[in-house]
Each structure stands twice: as C-alpha cells, then as structure tokens.
Amino acid sequence: MADFIASLRVCLQAGGEMRRRFAAVSRLFRFLPLVFGLCLFMPHSLCALSSSLSHRQAVDMARRGHFAEALPAFAELHRNHPSDLPLLYDYCVALSWAGKDAQAAFLLEDLNPQQMPRYVLEAFAKSLRNLKSFKKAESLYRLGVARFRVYPSLRLGLLCTLVDAGKHEEAAELGQALEKLYPGHVETQFALAYAAQGRGDYVAALRRYQVILKWKPQSRRARRLETLALAAIGDPFLAEETASRRPGLLRTEEWHRLKADQAALVTRWGEYGSDLPEQRFAETDRALAMLEDNEQAARSDQRRGDAFVRRARVDRLVALRDRVSMDRVVGQYLSLQAERVELPAYALQAVADAHLYLEKPRQAAELYRQVLDTQPGNFEAARGLFFAYVGLPERCPTC
C-alpha cells in the first residue's frame, strides 16, 4: 500500500510538470502570429537599411575617387530600386566624375532639369560639354544660372562652354562680368585663363596663372598650366626647367610634347645656320639628335607614344632638308607616304625643296601646290613653285 501511494505521488508530480510545460507552450503559441508577422516584415526592413547603407557607401567611395568599386555598387542599387530618384542622381554624378559622360547623359536625358538639384544639373551640363554637345550644355548652364544665382561654378562652366563652342566674343563679355563679380576668386582666374587659351592668347593665360600662383604658391594645377603656357608661347626650355623642379608635374604625353617642341625650336634655329662652315650645321645636328632621342622615348611608350613617333619622323624631314641631306628627305618621305601618314604643310614644303634640289621639278611643283592649297600666302612655297616651273623642260615629261 505504501508503495502504491508513493507511485501515485510521483505520477501526480509528473503530471504537474506536464501541465506547466503545456501552459508554457500554449503561451508561446499565442505569440506566434506576432512573431510570424515580424518575420514577414523584417527582411524588407533589413533590405531597406542595407540599401541605404550601400547607397551612402557608394557615394563615399565615389567622392574618394574609387570608381571601380562605386560604379558597380550604384549600378546594382539602381537595378534593384529603379524608381529611387536620389539614388539615380548620385549614380549619374558619380558617372560624370568617372568620365563616363555618355552613360551619365543617357540616364539623365529624360529627366526634368527644372527639378534637378544643383549638383546634378551641373554634372549633367559638364558631361554634355565633354561630349561636345555644346548647345545643350550651354542651355543647361544658363538654366542653372537662372535657378541658382549664388553659385559661381555654373557661370564659370557656361564661360568654358562658350569657349569650347568657339563663341569667343560672348565668352569675353561674360569673362569681364565674372572678373568684376569675383575679383579674388581662384577658379574665376582659371576660367579666364582657359578663355584666353581658347582664343590663342597664351601670354594672357600665362599672366592669369601667375596671378593664381601669387595667391596660392603651392598650386600644382596652376604651376602645370603655367609650364604648358610657357611652352606654347615658344619657351619650351624654360618650361622644362620649371617642370624638372617638380617631379610628376607633367603627364607623360605632356613631356613628349614638350620635348617635341624643343626639337622643333632647335630645328628653326638651325634653319638659319651660321656663316662659318664649321658651325653651319651645329644646331641642325643637335636637332637631329634630339629628334632621335624623342622618337626612341616615344617608341618605348606603347600606350601614348605613337603620335609622337610620327611627329619626330615628320619633323626630321625639315631638319634633314636644312642639313642638305636631300636623298634622305625623299627616302623618308616615301616611307611615310607608304604608311599613309598625312604630312602637314611645313613638312611637305621641306620635301618639295628636296625634290627641287635634286632636279625633280615636276614632283616639286606638285608638292608646292599642295602647300599653297592650305597656305595661300606662303611666300617661300610660291617662290619654290616658280623655280619648279622654270625647271620644267617641255621635252622631258618625266622630269
């Protein structure tokens, strides 16, 4: 009997434990609909939060210039959220920063510029300007100036667009107004220098860069542009001296161009020569050596050197003419002609001079005529043509 009572007590205790567990499970089931609802909405909320963070991260990467990471992130976000206008705006601005102007303009083309934020409108206008759609770019910049009057960058963008479009008179008028509006503004000086270069006044541009350097002596941008302006006004050796003191100031192609300008200048010095026989060809020989060095340096630059290899070969025709190496002039001309290299007028004139010297007046006359087609006022070519005609014997059609 005692054993039975003990067994019953155990069963009752077990039953109590079972009831407590059942009650706990029942309470859990009462909360299941709420838990299930949270599970339904939580992925969307987390996704939205993740997208927001990714958007901000993509913007931050683009601002730091990390376009290889930023642009794919923007592209994926735009695919997932095509109606997110702020996201699209930031994506297009990043494309513009990265130089993907055609893609940026395509995405913004159908949007209303009257509703675009300033930074988007300005990036859109700049992309159109880079794409040489100057009429559209000018229209957008003018709209931006009307909508956002206090921002000088839109007026400066308009000025540069007018320069690019060849509207130099309008650009000059706007430039005068901007100089009065922003007299101590560095970016205005850069834009005014750009306008001066656009109309071919590199001396005025040089003065602008020197003004900037007085205000900001450490400006590498102003120093680089000053260096290029020095080369453009005919002093490539001073330009090299300036650039050599600042490693990395010039890009590789700018160095190629600077060296080519130096060789061209020395070639012109050698053209006049000296009255002393031992000094007559000194500068021309120096020019030929420089052209050889320039060609070899350009050939070693597989990415950017082709145009400068051609320039060295073309300029060599002039130096060889001045060295009275006329057979070499004709031989190298034939090689360039076989490669379909189009020669500028100054090189054609050197080849014509070589043919005339070698008593081939018919070929010389044809080349002089080509020069005069592009340079009607070229006195030296006209005189050469006269002597070529004089040397044409009527009974020698092959001369």
Image: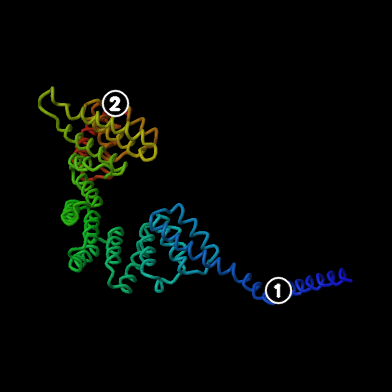
**Front label number (1 vs 2):** 1
Residue visible at 20% across and 45% down in the picture = 377
Do tag 1 and tag 2 residues touch (Cβ < 8 Å)?
Answer: no
* Extreme residue in the left direction: 275
Real-space CA distance between mark 1 and mark 2, rounded to the nearest whole angstrom: 104 Å
- Residue type at mark 1 is Ala
In the image, 224 versus 370, the foreground residue is: 224
- Residue type at mark 2 is Arg
* Extreme residue in the front direction: 2
Numbered label attached to residue 24: 1
194 lies left or right of 121 = left
Please identify the quadrant where the N terminus is shown. bottom right
346 lies left or right of 24 = left
* Residue located beneath label 2 in the image: 328
| Residue 153, image x, y percentages | 29, 65
Quadrant hosting residue 250: top left
User: How many dots with numbers?
Assistant: 2
- Check the image and tell me how it is coloured: rainbow
Secondary structure beneath label 1: helix
| Residue 320, image x, y percentages | 25, 29
* Extreme residue in the top direction: 278
170 lies left or right of 276 = right
